Amino acid sequence: MIKNNIKSIIDSELRQIELTDEIKNNIKSKAVYHKSNRAWGNLWRSLVASMVIVVLGGATVYAGYYMLNKVHVNEETLAELDSMQIVQMNELDAIPNEYGIVYKDYSDYNAVKDDLGVKLLDTNLSLDNPYMLCRVMTDIKDFAVITVNNFILGDTGNYQFIEAENRYSYSHGTEFFSPVSLTVDLILSEDQMSNGWDTDYLGLYEFVESYTSAQGYRVNIIQDAVDEENVEDYVSEKVAVFVADGVRYSLKGRVSIDTLKNIVNTMR
């Protein structure tokens, strides 16, 4: 019954994604699977649900849920990050869906921080950015996930909002072949803390390196392992994952490793 509930949640998410012919033509000929786990109170402990990531010409659509606190790439356990901690968060003014999950959308990362009442890392690279698309997903009691698409624009440009798809199209730059997105994971309860929160990158991902940032964060860098020899000037999608003040951050974009490291160093 519980597994069926999880399946219903994922199916409901996927039904909200309208794949136009243009989107279908832009979908890469690859499927990247990011499986994560999360404890859903006392009933949903130890259950695992897959999170499917489909790259749609620069936009990323998520359907799935997270459960523990290590990062794995194709069953390889990466260097340990700093520990996640319980965070106090304001209750959102939004109605939970049939599964007890609240979604709330914002157009600005500062508005997210103000609404949640949580002190989160930010960067001056995101200032004066009118193209952010932010969402908070939470069950109110155990966890919260913040996603910020187009968090850092770099030298990308020509942003045009596609209302039917709730995303922006853009032109890549020289240093940034895509904007950099941000995901923030918050643990809200002792139950979630006891279960932890592992994240698994499966399929077309590979581990790059672990290092310590200028601020002292322990960082894991991952990238896609897609063979794109036939694509001119192809830049792989890279992810930097680290924990600061008990909160886990993931920065993702098609930039060089040095650029991604420089971005991490600006997160304060």
Image (tube, helix red, strand yellow):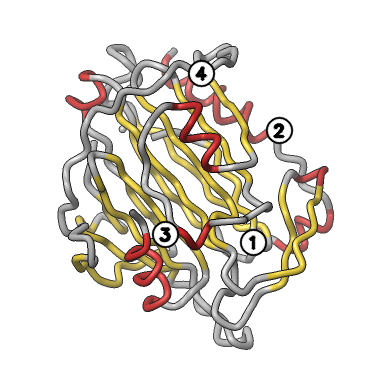
- Tell me which numbered mark, 1 or 3, is placed earlier along the sequence: 1
- Say what amino acid the circle numbered 3 marks: Gly
Mark 4–mark 3 distance (CA, rounded to whole Å): 35 Å
Q: Which numbered disc covers residue 92? A: 4
Side (left or right) of 249 relative to 165: left
- Tell me which numbered mark, 4 or 3, is placed earlier along the sequence: 4
Side (left or right) of 170 relative to 53: right
Q: Secondary structure at mark 3?
A: loop
The crowding category of the residue bearing disc 4, from other C-alpha atoms within 10 Å (few below 14, some 14 to 19, many at least 20), is: some
Q: Which numbered disc covers residue 58? A: 1
- Tell me which numbered mark, 4 or 1, is placed earlier along the sequence: 1
Mark 1–mark 3 distance (CA, rounded to whole Å): 19 Å
Residue at the image point whose x is 58% and y is 51% from the top: 149
Which residue bears the numbered disc 3? 203
- Say what amino acid the circle numbered 4 marks: Leu
In front here: 222 or 169?
169
Which residue bears the numbered disc 2? 16
Depth-wise, is mark 4 or mark 3 nearer the camera? 4
Q: How many marks?
A: 4
- Tell me which numbered mark, 2 or 3, is placed earlier along the sequence: 2
- Tell me which numbered mark, 1 or 2, is placed earlier along the sequence: 2
